[in-house]
Amino acid sequence: MNDLLNFLETKVAPFGDRVGNQRHLKAIREGFMMAMPLILVGSIFLILISWPSEGFINWLAKIGVLDVLTSMNQSTVAIVSLVACFGIAYRLAEGYEVDGPSAGVLALSSFILMAPRFSTEVLNDKGDKVMQTFAGAIPFTSLNANALFLAITIGLITAEIYRVFIQKGFTIKMPDGVPDVVSKSFSALIPGFTAFVFWACVLKGLEALHVPGGLGGLLGVIVGTPLELVAGTLPGMILCVIINSFFWFCGVNGGQVLQAFVDPVWLKFTTENQELVAAGKAAQHIITLPFKDLFVFIGGGGATIGLALCLFLFSKSKTNKTLGKLAIIPSIFNINTAILFTLPTVLNPIMLIPFVLTPTINALVTYFAMATGLVPLTTGVILPWTMPPIIGGFLATGASWQGAVLQALLIVISFAIYYPFFKVADHGNLMQEQGETK
């Protein structure tokens, strides 16, 4: 066991740190966070327009606010990829210590250039079907979560083009004394022109090859489809849970390691559910961001809310009693740093099994509860990951009491799994304390 722990500490943990802090993956993760306020605000409007009371919905329509609430929901969620593209380029440029806003604006314009336009089939003079666009109009489907892989690609490549020109000095340099804002604007001219020409060549090349959906469609096939087959299935979700928990056990933020790979897929599924519910249709995707944040990892990494209850209610060790009092309130808000590093849970061989097993069981129970219709699917409402249980489950499933009951059941499951391992750890701490006092 000591050899295993030494391997985890000296090999796996540093590897996880390198992956989590890799410049491009970090930029993707932080770029998405720029778009998150839009999704959270849009979720508030979704809660109102999808409230499970026909009388309430009719009242909203009667006073004339239902349509505007629907538009407000769509207008926030519908530009997620647009904002993410800006954010990814911005953060990557900052990582290279060059001007982030300039890189973000160039990526934003490049994304608009590459976004598919409204089009329809019409007949030409020969009677053949051809595609006709509508004055360059861009549908929301080209800007929302469906275009996340396009946003990631354009954001990263545009920022790389920008930083190469800046760092190599291939820019228009203004004389000393020119305001910094003006100087940066002129510095962006050559890399901006180069980026636009590059993306224009890509666009026309794909059109010449008749690639359906352009670059976004191509990325969807090459990248999106395999990731959706992994992150959108129960076995894939279980694999992600195990990897996440394994890295957390090693002291590395497992979410940071995985976010850049699977969160775009889960976000896409979430917003698709949100659009369906806003249109009065049934949600389709079981596995979404709320599925992960509010049900699988209830209490934080390792789903440790049950362990927090054990510490608070049944500790005999003085150290654990104190920790339980300090950790119970943060655990309700899914913050478990004290438990991870003070108990400790990290690299504690006693806690390895429950730390990996609990969120895995949570994923299985939640999936089958939703797949069988016992609990409604998440409606696309994205709540802060610090949302307390019961309330979070109620709101995430469309104000459904079944969602709240499911979260209560998951707390009981977490408690039941952690309790025997907690007793062993608590007894060991108690014996050590008694030995020190003799």
Image (cartoon, helix red, strand yellow):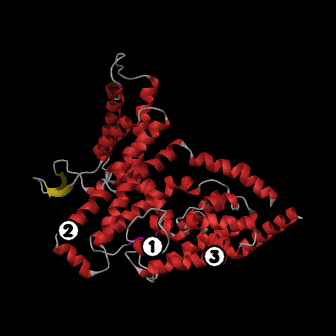
- Tag 1, which secondary structure? helix
Q: Earlier along the polypeptide chain: callout 3 or callout 1?
A: 1
Q: Residue 65 carries which label?
A: 2
- Where is residue 18 drawn, in percent x and y? 61, 45
Q: What residue type is labelled 2?
A: Val
- In the rendered structure, which segment of residues is drawn in magenta? 284-288
For residue 119, what is the image quadrant? bottom left
Residue linked to disc 1:
391
- Where is residue 219 drawn, in percent x and y? 40, 52
Question: Does residue 315 appear to the left or right of 106 in the view shown?
Answer: right
Query: Real-space Cα distance between discs 3 and 1?
Result: 19 Å
Residue displayed at 54% across by 64% down: 334
Q: In which quarter of the image is the C terminus?
A: bottom right
Q: In which quarter of the image is the N terminus?
A: bottom right
Q: Which amino acid does label 1 sit on?
A: Ile
Q: Which mark is residue 416?
A: none
Neighbours of disc 1 within 10 Å: few (<14), some (14-19), many (20+): some
Q: Earlier along the polypeptide chain: callout 2 or callout 3?
A: 2
Residue linked to disc 3:
415
Q: Earlier along the polypeptide chain: callout 1 or callout 2?
A: 2
